[in-house]
Amino acid sequence: MATTTPATDDLRIDETILSGDNADLALYKWLSKAERSAQSLNEEDLKITQNAFESCITKLVTGASPYPTPGRPLRNLAPRCLNILYARGETKSRFDTVRTLLTTAGDVKASEGVKVACLWCIGEIMAASGSQILSLVTDISNATVRLVKTSSLPVLVRYHAFLSLQKSLKTAGRGLTEAALKDVLKQTRYYMTDKALPIQRAAAQILTILHSEKESIKTVAEVESLVTLCAKGLEHADQPTRRSFSLLVAQVLSLTQVERPVVSTEKKASAKKDAGADDEADGPVSTLAETTKPLMTAAEMLAQISAHFNKPGASRKTRVGLFDFYVSLLMVLGPSWVETNYGVIVKHLITEIVVPVRQSTNTHDTSLVRKLVGMLLRDLIGVRMLSEQGQIAAIKELSEVYLKKWPALLPGQVAPHHNALVVALKEVAGLLQQLGNAPPPVQDALAEPLVHLLSHPNQGAQVAAAWCLRCFCFSTPLRLPKTVLSVVELLQRDITSLGTPPVTPEVGKRALGHANGLAALFAIIPDRPLYVSYDLSAKVFDMAIQLLKRAGEHDVAVAQVEVEVAWALISSLMALGPNFVRSHLPQLLVLWRNALPKPTSKDTSHATGRSVAEWTFLLRVREAALQAVLSFLRHNSPALVTLDVARRLASLLSNALAFANAFVGQPTEEIHDATSNLATREAMLRRRVYQCFAALGLSSATEVMQTTLLQSVVSLFASPDGYSGSSMQAAIASSTGNFSSVWAMTDGYAYGVTSTDRYSLKVFGKDEKGEGNPEESGERLNRDSVENAIDDLILAPIIGSCEHDTLALCRPQSVSEESAWPEPPPPMTGVVDAAIILFSMLLPAQDATSAARTINQIAQSIKSPKLERNLGRKAAIQINATTALLFTLRHAAQSRQARDVLGGGQVAEALVGVLK
């Protein structure tokens, strides 16, 4: 008779614990203790009690009386104990145990919990030691497929059946018979379209395992079929399911790049026999020549994904999900393959994704595609996969194939599309920042084309070229003085052309492009002060002054260009700081006073009779002047912003706001259409006003205007009448049920929702060192950062782009920062963001009565009857209000007086009315 010890007694259960009310808990405690004992016992003692302990666990898992139905804790713990037994004790009973569990899982009388527990245990045992019981894998396959096909079973059981099969195939797949393999392939492909996402996910994971060898894919048709199957499922897939689909596609497509033998038949004629022999020649002899090549070329493989991306009916969710396919595929292929085929990848992304006409017809689509391609090239390939030599080769490739091809000079040449140039320029800028110092081959490849691209007729390409040129000169400061002189000379030629009729629109665009390039270069002079002389800066300032003076001598079209160029140059010079600006400040104040006068009676009258061109001119010149004011405040405060200067600027800002309000009151249909040029220009002007007030800060200079400003910003981001879209379309969408969420909008406006809610909150979550905790910055644990960023774009109604605010070229941050590429939101959204930020600064400075009144006004707007027929605007107001109050409370936390005001009962009650 076997002897027992106190240690082996831990493996024996006292069944009296199963009769109490807390049987599950008691059983879990005993099993946890038994697991520790089984791990610590010597093997001889373990073998003594193995049979009894194994029998007990089997009864527990199968729910035999008197054991309760096992829940998740017990079913997780049970297979761990069994695997310890089989690892340290006898293994002869393992086959019978799995067979018993398999039989119970297939028993129609077994409960859901028992079936799940049995399937889980089978999967865990097979995952640990499946290679030692290969004969069972076919039985497991047949049983689990049968369970999945039983549609009356709960999804949880069917999912665990596939999960058990997945774990079994991973370790014992080679034991599967041919017939069983065909059945599994057939069923998993079928269940890739199941209604339950977990079933789709598990089916994709099984297919990924079954296609782990190159022999599993034999024809192009098989590849196309699987990729199509996964692409169709993206529309309704969640993130884990998209991830499973992307891994399957990556696995299948990567197999097409594996070299495999190809047998070709060649016929050779034998030589003729000697002359003295028979004249009859031997017949042709067939020989077999064996070569190796991949199933598809790299371009053909990538085209399998782009073909679905460019389908007319593809939704944003599907198209974003297809970029998950690209990410997974490139990660599976690895850095070596990516670096070798970099040119093929870039060419594919630009010609098949960026350039197609569908993306060019919608601004939001264009920004989305450029953002997706930028993530792939920069965050995945550039940062993670390219070596230093690979980065240099990538810059040379982009320069030779795209940057140097504009403009097309020879007959038959086709210049690259402007979107292709923007993508290429953005990636070159990122690679330059990554390299740090540009080596001579890079300098030779970029110096001339970047300057040429400043004259591109498309604004997006111009601004991208200006930013890339800034990065180039920052990394190669010896090139800075020569480049600045070259751009100044080009700008002077453009200015001369502006004064010589006839003036074509191309001249004006070229002048603005060179001005933006010069602005970007002057912005880095404070970081590279030894390379550009003071005299050159003074020369540019004088050029700008002369342009402003001569603008009155020309017609509206030419004057508009001259004024914009002049203020763009002045804005860039403000980045030089107080040492340069101080001597010019009196002259600047006069210029700003002339550019921002008080509105006249003609401006404020109900019907001024002005044409669209006149209104456009008046709006643009004011916005350009305010751009210079904002640049001055950002780079020269508080050194030059004295109380007197602040009062003067506040008065001018008040004039500009009054003009914007007068313009909105005009009975012109274009003013109230968010897609019109006039509405965009008004939004740009108002955005600059709010940004300037925020940069000016809270002081006695702005105290008298704070109430007016509060009313203005609240009416913008929280008023039912502040919606600039089509009220009729909004009502139709609400009544027909087409409206689902502002995050699902693809018009780049989304009913006027702020862009700071989902993405820019991370900026406000950072401390003074720029560090933010994961919760505040929106980061997700256990998720790849590139996949996370792509996933966010599914619900991104607003996508920023560099050309939306050219002042980003003059921003004071060093271009060596990781997130250097600026992406300001479109003007219609940027003005909402600026209003919310200004609101968050002004409200904490008010007394309790004023603060409560303002918050109550927001609450009344949310409850307005006008919003019943415009659900999109209602959702946007709720989001804007919540975001504004969040920023307000964060600002208030820095001041005790503000905390006392906002924490008082009167204000707290009003806050509850908005947030409940």
Image (cartoon, helix red, strand yellow):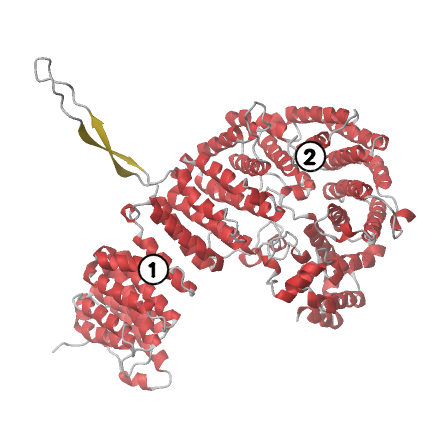
| x and y, in percent, of residue 507 in the image | 72, 29
| x and y, in percent, of residue 7 in the image | 23, 73
Q: Which residue is mark 2?
A: 516
Badge 1: few (under 14), some or many (20 or more) residues near its Cα, within 10 Å? many
State whether residue 521 is above or below residue 135. above
Residue type at numbered disc 2: Asn
- The image quadrant of residue 562 is top right
- The image quadrant of residue 274 is top left
Instruction: Return the residue nearer the eye: 189 or 800.
Output: 189
Task: Specify whether residue 719 is in view.
Answer: no
State whether residue 766 is above or below residue 900. above
Q: Secondary structure at mark 1?
A: helix
| x and y, in percent, of residue 846 in the image | 79, 62
* Image quadrant in which the C terminus is located: bottom right
- Residue at 68 percent across and 38 percent down: it is 810
- Residue at 31 percent across and 69 percent down: it is 147
Q: Secondary structure at mark 2?
A: helix
Q: Which residue is mark 1?
A: 188
